[in-house]
Image (cartoon, rainbow, N blue to C red):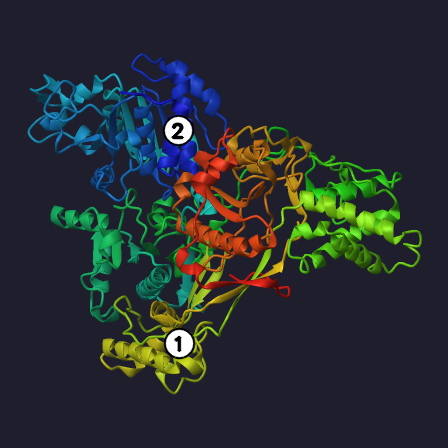
Amino acid sequence: MQTTDPKRAVLQITQRLSLRKPQAEALRRLDDIVTLINPNKATDVEMARTAVREVYGNLADATFEDFERDFPSVCFALATGVGKTRLMGAFISYLYMIGKSRNFFVLAPNLTIYEKLLADFQPSSPKYVFRGIEAFAHNAPLIVNAENYEEGRGVRGTDLFGQEGAIINIFNVSKINSEARGGNAPRIKRLQEYIGESYFSYLSGLEDLVLLMDEAHRYRGSAGAKAIAELKPILGLEVTATPKSVGSKSQDFRNVVYRYDLPDAMEDGYVKEPAVGTRANFNPKSVDEAMLERIKLEDGVHYHEHVKVALETYARQNDAKVVRPFMLVVTQDTTHARQVNEFVQSDDFFGGRYKGRVAEIHSKQGAEESDENAQRLLNIEKAGDTDIVIHVNKLKEGWDVSNLFTIIPLRASASDILTEQTLGRGLRLPYGKRTGVDVVDTLTVIAHERFNDLIEKAKEDNGVTRKLKTVTIGDGGDVPSSKPMSVPAPSIVDQMLAQAEAKAKPTVAVTEGEESKDGAPTVLPAAALSTPPGPHSPLTITTPEELKVARTVLDVVLPQVSKQVSSIKDLKDPKVIERIAEAAMAAQTEPGLFDSMTKEKAISVAQEVCNIFVERTLAIPALTITPQQQVSFGFRRFDVDMKSWNFQPLSRELFIQALRTEKTSRISGEAEGPTASRLEDHIVARLIDFPEVDYDAHAAILYDLAEQAVVSTRNRFGGDEDQTRSVIRGHAKAMAENIFSQMKQNMWREQTNYRVSLASAFGELRPQAFESAGAGFIRDLRTPPDQKQEIKKYIYTGFTKGCYQYAKFDSDPERKLAVVLENDPSVRLWMKPGPNQFKIFDTSGSPYQPDFVVETDAAKLIIEVKRLSDMKDPEVLRKADAASLWCHIATQVCIPRGEKPWSYLLVPETDVQENFTIAGLVATHARVPNMDLLGRYIIEGQLSEHEELVP
């Protein structure tokens, strides 16, 4: 088997599997540990323990003390929803690629997780854990499980399957430590004639067996621990969200080498935000326990149906898959669970609308029903046939799906609710990342009687919803002892002039920093910055009068002139320079300031400023794009799709408060005030709130759609006008949002041509500013960060071609691209543009700020550097389309004026190497604009009045 360099393997796996930050860090630490101890059958466990303890014994996110087993075993504690199964796939890929092992044993704690693992390790699964791993592309790992191991799969020396790649055994722990029927040993420990020993003994004799334990806290019992020890693996890799043993005397794991808790995942946006919901203006003590449970169940259904329509609306608006949600009811015991099940499927609960849409899970069911429910749970994300799941204690781990949005804990304490076992079931995001839509990104707990308790309990450091982090202060800590400062980054031209102004005032000492009176961080004056490097001479302007004219030219006159010339090259025209000098002189109102300043001297000053401005400014044109004729659009008539609608009469408000952010919201029930003369008016009133809807132009279609909604609702309630009115009034907003999402899919629009003109030949290079922990965090461009993930802490300098002396980078590949730009002789200028430097917006209206703008001898470039895994991300492509279209239009505007053409480059990080050239990147990554749009733009030859770019 061909092996891969470990560090290269880590990089490849991180990129190919698109690992999240905590997954990538866990993989990096595994690489570190493998390097430290070189696990094998002959490993000295005590020496290995000491080596790991020295590195991971006292970190903020690691508390390793002991392996806690007879072999090296380490735990990676990752929060629910971050992706532990994918991490196990990364671990196996790494150990196989570096040649450490080709035999793996994956242990599952129960049948549910066992079947989920079997599915995720199959190439046909959409969640296949090895997708993108080249080592497994043509030779997928052989999966051995409890159903097929007796066929001889995976045994070395057998010719039945001829397997030469990785062999992954996946077993439920009960198959190992439970006794077989009619014998004293599990089946896996029985003699197998084809190998002359039991399969268990065969595995324990392997020289490279690696054990992976999913939900590792389930294997700390005596039986489980003994069975694991008998496998004699060379290395144990434990993953869990709760690194504590189970039982009444729970103990923290002592072998944790990386911990990424739920609060970290919430802060980084990897999971939903938990929230708590209650009924507004409701005192839970005013009703008995039975009535309180009924109210909570009813309110839970109200919220569940609200979520259901919100999810469909989001899917329509964003061309995404429709997520079918369900709600989870947590009961006290099996008798309680059965009572709740009977009630929610009865005619007394919303007229029996949830009959057949309920799954009940607890330990006292017969085998047949349990298997049926287990299958429903495995398929619940895609089946959409379950609205309510009732459970007691069966869903402690492994079943953390993405379509759970509502939890109703009955008879539970605040401490019981705020546990990862309860909240963790629904924290996984349905679209893999936050959407920005509150309902889609939130997991809500309906807990009327515990509302205030939960709000207060969430503020405690309970390991689930805490917001506090530890911060160390001092040298080598999180916050260095040096005083922070704000480092200004004016343009090179502005900086040169500031230094000339400082020299003209020798009595004013230039200090390292000046503290503002309001206690703000220290500010490094622009005049204190070092002389900008580059192929230019210092300004010869020295007298106060000359410096005043120069400052006026730069700050006042040139921004106005940019709208009056067709190219930055015009600033070298003597006639233009003369007009600039006259404008600068005329702008001064201080009496007697220019008594000694002749016109010739003013022209000389203006010429010097203009020359250095042309040489050190990357000219970015400001374009005006306006429609040639009035835009006409409307909506076609269509039948509203209401299959997902199941709104219920709502007689109260549901009050929702997010646990971590404490943000509040309400779902209104019957509104106060007069009732509209027509029920359709409630929906139409909500529809006309959308800016695309014009009541006068679209009234007919609006009432047609609203009437469909009213008729459908009335039919659902058998013509009951009171219930129909309650539903329409209470849910008009959600109905309107869903209807409008369908209206957008039935919108017609006339083809519109756009007129493009040049508003400004060049823009102002606005000053930037960066926060720094001190001079020790300002580095030369060619000095990489000590740790790549900390690059955002540093400010970089040492540029000879930059439009600014300082820059910050979001990644080390960006820094490397800056090195390429500095090294390439064809590059004249480059910069990292600040906010609002460009007026480019994508089709969703989001502004786009490029990573780099570059001017070479032949062209101007916008360059974006992205991770390989993000190159096909819809948001990245949407912005790339907008930028490439802007470049095409800018080229058409600028070439007739003697300016260079523009191009857009979308470059993967893997292609940024310091020995590359810009010409090579252009040849490979220049992006062609959408040709279907180009014919709609008409380029004008003359300058327009000043306007900003409208996409």
* 835 vs 656: above or below: above
Residue 124 vs residue 514: left or right?
left
Residue at 28% from the left image edge and 22% from the top image edge: 101
Quadrant of the image occupied by residue 307: bottom left
Residue 863 vs residue 310: left or right?
right
- Residue occupied by mark 1: 670
Instruction: Tell me the element at label 2.
Output: helix
Instruction: Please identify, in this view, whether the residue under mark 2 or under mark 1 is nearer the observer.
Output: 2
Q: Position of residue 522 (x, y in %)?
A: 72, 41
Residue 333 vs residue 151: left or right?
right
Tell which circle, 2 or 1, labels the residue nearer the N-terminal end: 2
Q: Position of residue 712 (x, y in %)?
A: 26, 76
Q: Amino acid at mark 2?
A: Val
Mark 2 and mark 1: Cα distance apart in space = 57 Å
- Residue occupied by mark 2: 10
Nearer to me, 160 or 73: 160
Residue 891 vs residue 694: left or right?
right
Q: Position of residue 309 (x, y in %)?
A: 33, 65
Residue at 85% from the left image edge and 48% from the top image edge: 546
